[in-house]
Amino acid sequence: MIRALGDKKPKIHPTAFVSESAYVVGDVEIGEGSSIWPGTIIRANGHKIKIGKFVNIQDNCVIHSDADGEYGDYVTIGHHVMCHATTVAEHCLVGNGATVNGHANIGHHSIVAAGSVVLERAEIEPYSFAVGAPAEVKRQVNERHLQMLDNLPNGYYRNGQIFRDAGLNDPDIAQFTDPNV
């Protein structure tokens, strides 16, 4: 379900896939080739949430922020993630079941491991591998991680296009598409 809230209306690129069972409301921008999967909630009632190009936000995620939030290009948000980040920079992975608390910033090409908890106002530097509760940087990402970060969004883009072409986009998406996003 895609909904405006007052004068705040989602802007969705025509190539994006937004599942018919996702809920996107308010000042949300979704970029080219991005995919929003079933059960996901993106709620931008107080602050803008900008989702870049070829981002995939997988099943049952909650995306909200107490400040403007930005998800860079080629980001993967794994299944059942709770994310209140201010920034998740380009080419990042937030693993399944992780929690990223308010005003946190995740630097580019970083991984937050599955089940980790990033504390409020945490700063995860670029190329970091953060793990645990609370999440700590244990090491830097390696070449294998970088290849994975580059390849994950491609598969989700293709899957999103299959679902989109099968008519499984939210039926309201047409009124919210904006080719300038």
Image (tube, helix red, strand yellow):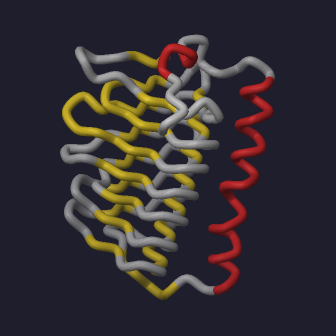
Q: Position of residue 181 (x, y in %)?
A: 48, 39
Q: As displayed, is residue 87 above or below residue 178?
A: below
Q: Position of residue 24 (x, y in %)?
A: 43, 26
Give the farthest residue toward the front.
180
The reply, left or right, for residue 127 in relation to residue 76 is left
The residue depicted at 77 percent of the width and 44 percent of the height is 158
Q: Position of residue 37 (x, y in %)?
A: 60, 34
Q: As displayed, is residue 121 above or below residue 169?
A: below
The residue depicted at 28 percent of the width and 39 percent of the height is 48
The residue depicted at 49 percent of the width and 59 percent of the height is 94
The reply, left or right, for residue 176 in relation to residue 4 is right
The residue depicted at 53 percent of the width and 28 percent of the height is 39
The reply, left or right, for residue 1 in relation to residue 84 is right
Q: Position of residue 106 (x, y in %)?
A: 37, 67
Q: For the image shown, how many numbered marks are present on the structure?
A: 0
Q: Quadrant of residue 57?
A: top right
Q: As displayed, is residue 2 above or below residue 88?
A: above
Q: As displayed, is residue 151 above or below residue 6?
A: below
